[in-house]
Amino acid sequence: MTVAVVVFPGSNSDVDAQHAVRVAGANATLVWHKDTDLGDAQAVILPGGFAHGDYLRTGAIARFSPIMNAVRDFADRGGPVLGICNGFQILLEAGLLPGAMVRNRDIKFVSRLVPVRVDQVDTPFTSACRQGQVLHLPIAHGEGNYTADADTMAALEANRQVIFRYVDADGQPCEAGNPNGSARNIAGICNATRNVVGLMPHPERACEAALGSADGLAVLSSLVHGLGVSSSR
Amino acid sequence: MRARVYVTLKPSVFDPQGRVVTDALTTLGYDDVRDVRQGKYFDLEVAGTDAEQVRARVTDMASRLLANPVIESYRVEVLA
């Protein structure tokens, strides 16, 4: 299988994501944001970085990149789409996921390894995880403070669309375990049809023990094994 | 014509930057400051002479790009 990793001007985790997909056992190709089709890709990753400089708002300009029409069509057909960090912010601006990001609670860019609990396993990106499993993943963002209106938040909880939450050392989603002020400790969500997932932590930067954690591999392995094709690298 | 678009976080959305500015003002001795909300504005030069048409165009720009309606409100002024 092939995963398309979209490259925006300012993406900086594109090659990391491509590498991590390969570590998980599938092929990954880089697709430029001005391209208009995704080829034969069976999944799409919008990687981390600072697309278009994050000018105006994070993800606000990237949302209008030509490739996003193809990403939207792919998502509407049920194709698995993963937005990591800036990719998550782009999915929010594009309306492919509900809610929005504001500046971190303490107005600081936070870059460190944090415990993240997998709350739902019925998505293409968590199917190889255990419910309640705690993954140690790096975060690196200035705007990861998720917010949504009360109705949206209620719907997210009722439909089990909160996929990842920040937790403390005991695995509890409390204030002490919340690195950025995100509502309800939300680290990642999915859409109503569960094929589009966005998360602020970087699983692709934690796929090998040499990187300090290999926990992120569970996210990419979920995708590769879920689609049932192991590939030719 | 010139137009100005003010963009602010909706009252229900926590403004971390406004909070920090509030704290800084308090530290400077302005302890009468109760709250600060930070926003931004855009000055646009738009072709056209009909104020209402320009207003409609700029309102469209504000809703599609300049503001994120999920968390922000905007106000359009046509300045002539």
Image (spheres, rainbow, N blue to C red):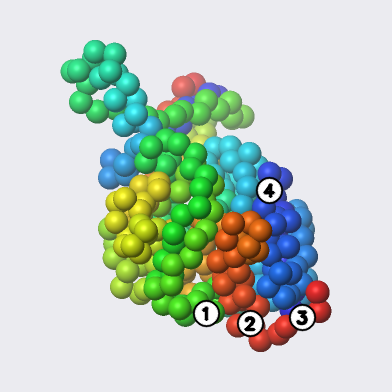
**Label 1 with label 3: CB-CB less than 8 Å:** no
Using a 10 Å C-alpha cutoff, classify the residue at mark 2 as few (fewer than 14 neighbours), some (14 to 19) or many (20 or more). Answer: some
Q: Which residue type does callout 4 highlight?
A: Asn
Q: In the displayed image of the protein, which residue is found farthest to the bottom? A: A228
Residue B78 pos. (x, y %):
46, 27
Q: Earlier in the sequence, mark 2 or mark 4?
A: 4
Could you tell me how far apart the alpha carbons at marks 3 and 2 are, in whole angstroms?
10 Å
Residue B56 position within the rendered picture, expressed as x and y whole percent measured from the top left: 48, 40
**Residues beneath discs 2 and 1 located on the same chain:** yes
Q: Nearer the viewer, residue A63 or A170?
A: A170
Is label 3 in a helix, a strand or a loop? Answer: loop
Circle 2/circle 1 CB separation < 8 Å:
yes
Residue lying farthest to the top in this orientation: B29
Q: Earlier in the sequence, mark 4 or mark 1?
A: 4
Does A226 sit left or right of A8 as displayed? left
The residue under the point 38% across, 32% down is: B17
Q: Which mark is residue A12?
A: 4
Element carrying mark 1: loop
Which residue is identified by label 3? A231
Q: Which of the two discs, 2 and 1, labels the residue nearer the N terminus? A: 1
User: Share a chain, discs 4 and 1?
Assistant: yes
User: A161 or A57: which is nearer to us?
Assistant: A161
Disc 4 element: loop
Which badge, 1 or 3, comes first in the chain's sequence? 1
Q: Residue at x 65, y 63 (%)?
A: A208
Residue receiving disc 1: A127
Give the residue pinned by disc 2: A225
Residue A53 location in percent, x, y?
63, 39
Q: Amino acid at mark 1?
A: Ser
Crowding around mark 1 (Cα neighbors within 10 Å: few <14, some 14 to 19, many 20+) is some
Quarter that holds the N terminus of chain B: top right
